Image (cartoon, rainbow, N blue to C red):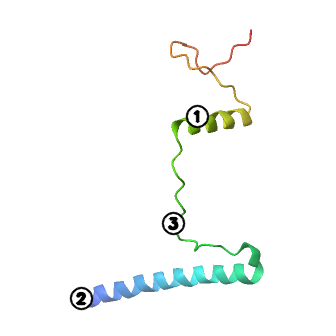
Amino acid sequence: MNKHFDAFVEKRKDDKKIIDSLNHSLGQYIMYAYNKPKEYPRRPFMSEPEQMPLSSPEEMERMAKRFTKRLGGEILLKDHGNKNRGTTNNN
């Protein structure tokens, strides 16, 4: 057929996919509003998450130590000459 007509048909197919996706999202919102109103999202599902402010290197170090302790890990001293770094000594 005509290349312009083929392009128009493809565009219509793409539009139908977009509309179907939007209708699916609308159905999810309605489902939450009707069945679980307390869990209804505050922001749209597809919205960008809020950017958290970057932490200072010191704050990142504190967080890493806290996570390591919570997970039962061992915090090793900074010893760049230690060849057995990352292993534990069972003396």
Residue 6 found in image quarter: bottom left
Residue displayed at 58% across by 72% down: 45
8 above or below 41? below
Residue 29 drawn at (x, y percent): 65, 80
Residue 69 found in image quarter: top right
Q: Residues within 10 Å of mark 1 (few under 14, many from 20)?
A: few
Q: Which residue is mark 2?
A: 4
Mark 3 or mark 2: which is in front?
Answer: 3
Residue closer to the observer: 25 or 8: 25
Counting residues from the start of the chain, the first of labels 3 and 2 encountered is: 2
Q: Which mark is residue 48?
A: 3
Determine the secondary structure under disc 1. Answer: helix
Marks 2,1: beta carbons within 8 A: no
Q: Which mark is residue 87?
A: none
Amino acid type, callout 2: His
How far apart marks 2 and 1 lie (CA) works out to 60 Å
Residue displayed at 58% across by 39% down: 59
Q: Residues within 10 Å of mark 3 (few under 14, many from 20)?
A: few
Amino acid type, callout 3: Glu
Amino acid type, callout 1: Glu
Mark 1 or mark 3: which is in front?
Answer: 1
74 above or below 63? above
Counting residues from the start of the chain, the first of labels 2 and 1 encountered is: 2
Q: Which residue is mark 1?
A: 61
